[in-house]
Structure formats: C-alpha cells, structure tokens
Image (cartoon, helix red, strand yellow):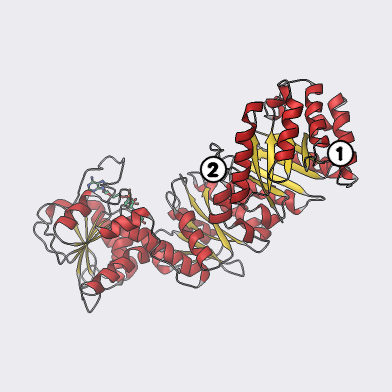
Amino acid sequence: MTFIAVAVPVVRADQISAALETARLAKAQGADLVEWRVDSLAQEPGAASAVTRLVQDAPMPCIVTVRHVAEGGGFCGTDEQRQQVWTAACTAHPPAAYVDVELATYRSDSMAGERARDMSRLGSLGSGSGPRVILSFHDFEGRPHGLSARIAEMWADPSSTVSKVVWTARTPRDNTEAFEVLAARAKPTIALCMGEHGLMSRVLAPKFGAFLTYARSDAQGTAPGQPTVEELVQQWDFRSIGPKTRVYGVLAHPVGHSRSPALHNRWFREARVDARLFAIAAGPTWESFKATLLELLSLDTLHFSGCAVSLPHKLNAIRFVEERGGVVDSMARCIGAANTISVAADGTLHASNSDLAGVCDPLSRAARTHGWSGGLRGRHALVIGAGGAGRAAAVALASAGAEVTIANRTTDRAMSVAAELNNSLGLGANAASSIAARSLFDLGATRFDVIVQATSAGMVSGEDADVDPLPETVPLTDTTIAMDLVYTPQETPFLRRAARAGAHAIGGWSMFIAQAAQQHRLWTGHDPKNMDIGMDMNARSRSL
Ligand code: NAP
C-alpha cells in the first residue's frame, strides 16, 4: 500500500492546536500519515516539548522533519537544536513513526550526522521503540546531478528504512524517471516530482509501489502540483490505482485550463475502468510534442494508452502517428487534423478526430427534437469560419448529408477550404452535395436550417468577445438550429441572439462533451455512463 502523507508546517508553539486540527481533518479525508515540518519551530525556545506534544497528540502516525535551508527548508539553527527535536521525536510516548534526515546531514562528520546514524541503527532494529529513518534528497532547481548514484547510496545504507528523492520536474518527462527509480528500488522508496509537471508522479505513486505520496489538506494553501487529499482520494480514486492502471493524457500548449482530466476521469470512475487521464504540457513545438509522446510510450510499465490532442498539436498528431507507422483515420486525414491518439494492444497507433462527433451528435439530437425525419440529410447548413473548427464542422455536416455552405470573413480562405474538402471527400465541385463557399458579407437573406458559429468571435478575453459574426440579414427563427462552438463563455452574443429568436441554441460545451464521449467510446468500447455530467457550464448552455 502507498500511504498518503500530509506535510503540516508548524512555525511556533502557539500553532500546535491548529496544526493538530489540520491533521485531524486530513485524516478524515483519507490521509494515513502526517509530517510535522518543524524547521522554524526547532529554533524556538521550548521546541523539544512542543515537538513532544505534536508527536504524542498526532491523530495518525507521524514523520518529524527539520529541513535545512541548504535542502530547501527553513532551518538554519545549530546541531544541538536539531538533535533536541530528534530526541523529542524518539522519546515521546508513542514516538514518531519516522524521522526524515537529509542525505548530506546523514553522511557528514558533524554531531548531527552521528546522531542521525545512531537513530537510524536503533530504528532499524525494528523493536518498535524508536522512529525509522527516511533518508532524503531534494532538488528544487531541477533533476539532481548524479541521481542514480545518490539513490544507490541511499539504498545501500543498511540502517535507514526508507529512501526519498524529490526534485522539480522541468518537463512531463521527469515523471517517467521517477517511475524508473521506483521500479528499481532496493527498499521502500519515495520518488516524486514537484511543480506543475509533477502531478503524474504524485498520483501514480501506487502504480509503481512508492512508499508514500504527499497531498495537502484543504486547510493549507496551494503547493504547485500537489493535489489535496480529497482530490487524490475522490477525483483520482487513488486507492484503486495499481500496477495495471492505464494512463491517458491530454496534450496541449497551454494545457492548464483543460477540463478533459475532470471529465474523462469521472467517466472512467463511473464505468469502473482502471485508467487515469492527465493534463500534459507538451510545449508548443513539433519537437517537444514528439519527445513527450516518445517518452510516455517508451516506458512499458506506464501502460500509456492514448491521448486527447488540442491546440497547437492537432497536425502534429497526424505526423507523429504517420512517422511511427500507425493508422490515420480517413476523416482525420480529410480535415487535416487529429484530436485523438489511441494505442492498440499490439502497440499500433491510431489517429482520429472526435470533433466530427462533437459537432454532429448534438446537431443530430436537435434535429430529432425538431422532428426532422431524415436527420440532417438534405438540410441547408451554414458554417461560419474556415479555421480548424470550421473545417471539422463542414466535414461533419457534409458527412451527415447536409447541404453545406462555408462563409468566412476572408472569402479566399473559405473558397480554398471548400475546394480542399470537396476534393478529399470525393465531392466534385459541381456535385449536388458539394460544399459551397461564400463571403460572410454576401449572404443576404439566405435562409439556413442549421447555422454553426465556428469562428473565435465571442470567446471570452478574445479580441472580439462582444462580436456576433452572423450578419443581421441572415434569418434566425424558431425553426433554426444554431450551434456555437465557442464554449467560454457559455452565453456568446451569437447564442443570445439565437435564443431571442426562439431558435434551438446549442452551446460549445455540448461539442466538448460529445467529442470527449467519442474518445471515451474509442478507448473503452463503451458509452460514457453519464453524459449529463452536471458541470455548471454545460447545464447553463443547455438551458439557453
Ligand atoms: P482558427 O483556426 O484560428 O480560425 C478562426 C476563424 O475565425 C477564422 O475563420 C477567422 O476568419 C474567424 N474569425 C475570427 N474572428 C472573427 C470575427 N471577428 N468575425 C468573423 N470571423 C472571425 O480557430 P479554430 O481552431 O477554428 O477555433 C475557432 C473556435 O472554435 C475557437 O473559439 C475554439 O475555442 C472553438 N472550438 C471549440 C471546440 C469545442 O470543443 N467546443 C473545439 C474546437 C474549437 P479569418 O480566416 O478571416 O481570419
């Protein structure tokens, strides 16, 4: 079992009651251990009795840590002060379960080094009368030099019980190195990455048999990359993670805003699928996208099984799969972009584009509601915008049999996109069902059954946040189905106008849910258990 530890800093003796309360709360949420971080307290008069109280009254087994400034902690006192704290940790009734000692201190000739080695020898006797020693090494700047040699030295020490190495991840790839350390462990080991890239190493600690992972209590401030105990236990379903847990990602730049992990992990949980999906910042270039994916695929025991791909990597997804001899789905090839990569059991990569289903599924549902017996077939559909989203919407609608017109601010772009799509869909320019191109400003009073707003106008904090790009002359009535692909905010100027006109208005959140549902089907073979996920944005866009 991998324990969940909560580190609680205690600066002064008058904070002990609050610290104990924080530990009680963390225990109630699912933590197994509390680490008393007493770097500053250790330098205060009366530190020994304060630490004795912390240890004796701790609501769960505790670790006592006095981290030196040289190791990124706050302690800059004397050897004697540190030893007083250790003595208190050893002589309390019951004593602390563990004392964390830095490798540099442990191997030094100082008094503290000698005392640490004594403590370690006594703890290793396993009499239950004293704390065990966790030998630790931290690097806040990045991956430590000589990582392998240091960890081998810690493992070789016969007396310390647990080895711990923690560093700040510079890229998502540091996580796999932490997993390799755990896989090679010669004794109970903690290997974690700090910072925004390190979440995977924290959450997947049980998959690789780590001794513990750290989480923060709700009562504490934010620590970059560290989930709360509640998030770890509830959202990540930490207790059910094991060696066979499959790993997925959403690769984008930036990726911090992505709602894909919350959505997919919820669906995995509800379907009892043993898989987790992480936001993975892949950097903006082809090289960083490729390097990140290669690293994730290279570690067999990670069971990396696929990823959602977002901007700016949708083209790179096709290139990567092609380079690796995989299969690119014909629709993804037609749109020229893929947003999903799946890894088959034999390792073959597949690239596909679930944005098609993202557009088509909500529109088809709306068509059924309207009693359109043929669905979207034969319906006149307008797609505003000729970027990536516009292309996906046009292909989705054309594939469903609609008569599609692409209208764009820059007419030439609409023309070239329409020509390209007609070509790849095998629709001759003069075929009855070929995709037409128009200038956005030349639509007059043309009536459409379906209007899809696929420009970035209306997007929060964008240049045209207040803009509704549909010309006033184009009729919007209660027989129109109007869909906006923008999902932040949920009520765009275009959707407000559609709702005022009594049209069937569909927000971009519906597309997001539908395209994610298609990914879930692809990865698990099942429909998501619960499409009505009750997220605020979705609920509000559906009520428009
Ligand atoms: P893109 O490739 O940058 O294309 C932007 C398009 O918007 C271009 O056709 C551009 O016209 C047009 N445009 C921008 N501002 C305009 C304005 N003020 N008036 C008229 N046209 C304007 O972007 P994209 O990838 O297609 O994405 C478009 C939107 O779809 C974004 O807001 C994105 O968030 C959203 N989206 C949503 C989902 C979802 O799951 N709901 C998925 C994908 C995309 P020009 O060619 O004339 O510049």
Horizontally, is 147 left or right of 460 in the view?
Answer: right
Nearest to the observer: residue 383 or residue 152? 152
Identity of the residue furthest to the bottom in this view: 373
- Please, what is the three-letter code of the amino acid marked with disc 2? Asp
Residue 25 at x, y = what percent?
59, 45
Q: Identify the residue shown where x is 63% and y is 58%.
A: 239
Answer whether labels 2 and 1 touch (C-beta < 8 Å).
no
Residue 236 at x, y = what percent?
56, 55
Residue 503 at x, y = what percent?
17, 62
Q: Is residue 73 above or below residue 356?
A: above
Q: What element carries label 2?
A: loop
Q: Would the CB of label 1 be found within 8 Å of ligand 1?
A: no
* Residue 217: assigned label: none
Q: Identify the residue shown where x is 21% and y is 49%.
A: 493
The answer to whether one can see residue 453 in this image is yes
Residue 88 at x, y = what percent?
80, 32
Q: In this view, does 321 lie above or below 87?
A: below
Q: In this view, does 180 lie above or below 332?
A: above
Neighbourhood count class around disc 2 (C-alpha, 10 Å): few under 14, some 14–19, many 20 upward: some
Q: Is mark 1 on a helix, strand or loop?
A: helix
The answer to whether one can see residue 291 in this image is no
Dot placed on the residue nearer the N-terminal end, 2 or 1: 1
Residue linked to disc 1: 120
Neighbourhood count class around disc 1 (C-alpha, 10 Å): few under 14, some 14–19, many 20 upward: many
* Residue 218: assigned label: 2
- Please, what is the three-letter code of the amino acid marked with disc 1? Ser
Nearest to the observer: residue 47 or residue 474? 47
